[in-house]
């Protein structure tokens, strides 16, 4: 296993009980739903990355102060390198979301949070479910994450 990790940011655009999802094209998750998201660039904060990804993928302007951290997940098995995924809820933004990357995405749609499509990529789906449950941290895909036994 790699000794490096990728840091991902995921943006949960929420309005009127609905969540914005994008349908992926290509090798990773082609035909499945995902959140607007992406990897941190060198020298970039997670807040700057979330703002950038929202602008690049769905053409909305998000202020860093409108990002609310809602979940972090440490993921193995979602690619060749482990990932640390940070999920940010956003309820205020400027613009109407559109598919700004048609070469990477085929659709942008709003879904009721209690009726998400069945074909959401498992990694972002874990973060969405944790957000809805109020769970702020989890691990996914690791074999060694059993609870530590209580000391006697």
Image (tube, helix red, strand yellow):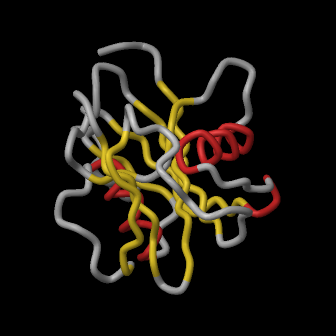
Above or below, 71 against 99 in this view is: below
Res 152 visible:
no
Which of the 4 image quarters holds residue 144? top left
- Estimate the x, y position of residue 46 in percent, counting from the top left: 68, 39
Please, is residue 133 above or below residue 76 in the view?
Answer: below
In which quadrant of the rendered image does the C terminus lie?
bottom left
Nearer-the-camera pick, 50 or 140:
50
Q: Judge left or right: residue 97 versus residue 125.
A: right
Q: Is residue 13 above or below residue 55?
A: below
Query: Which image quarter is the N terminus in?
Result: top left
Q: Looking at the image, how many numbered discs can be counted on the residues?
A: 0
- Identify the residue shown where x is 38% and y is 53%: 22
**Residue 140 spot, x, y in % from top left:** 30, 46
Query: At 28% from the left edge and 19% from the top edge, which residue is drawn?
Result: 80
Residue 14 image-quadrant placement:
bottom right
Residue in the image at 61% along x and 64% along y:
96
Q: Position of residue 48 (x, y in %)?
A: 74, 39
Residue in the foreground of this view, choosing between 29 and 26 = 26
């Amino acid at each position: 296993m790699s000794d490096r990790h990728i840091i991902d940011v995921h943006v949960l655009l929420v309005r009127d009980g609905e969540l914005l999802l994008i349908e992926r094209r290509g090798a990773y998750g082609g035909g499945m739903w995902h959140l607007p998201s992406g990897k941190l660039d060198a020298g970039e904060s997670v807040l700057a990355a979330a703002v950038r990804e929202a602008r690049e993928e769905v053409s909305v302007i998000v202020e860093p102060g409108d990002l609310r951290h809602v979940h972090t997940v440490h993921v193995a098995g979602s690619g060749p390198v482990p990932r640390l995924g940070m999920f940010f809820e956003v309820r205020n933004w400027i613009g109407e979301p559109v598919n700004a990357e048609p070469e990477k995405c085929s659709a942008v749609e709003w879904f009721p949070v209690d009726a998400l499509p069945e074909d959401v990529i498992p990694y972002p789906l874990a973060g969405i479910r944790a957000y809805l449950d109020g769970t702020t941290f989890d691990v996914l895909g690791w074999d060694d994450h059993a609870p530590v036994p209580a000391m006697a």
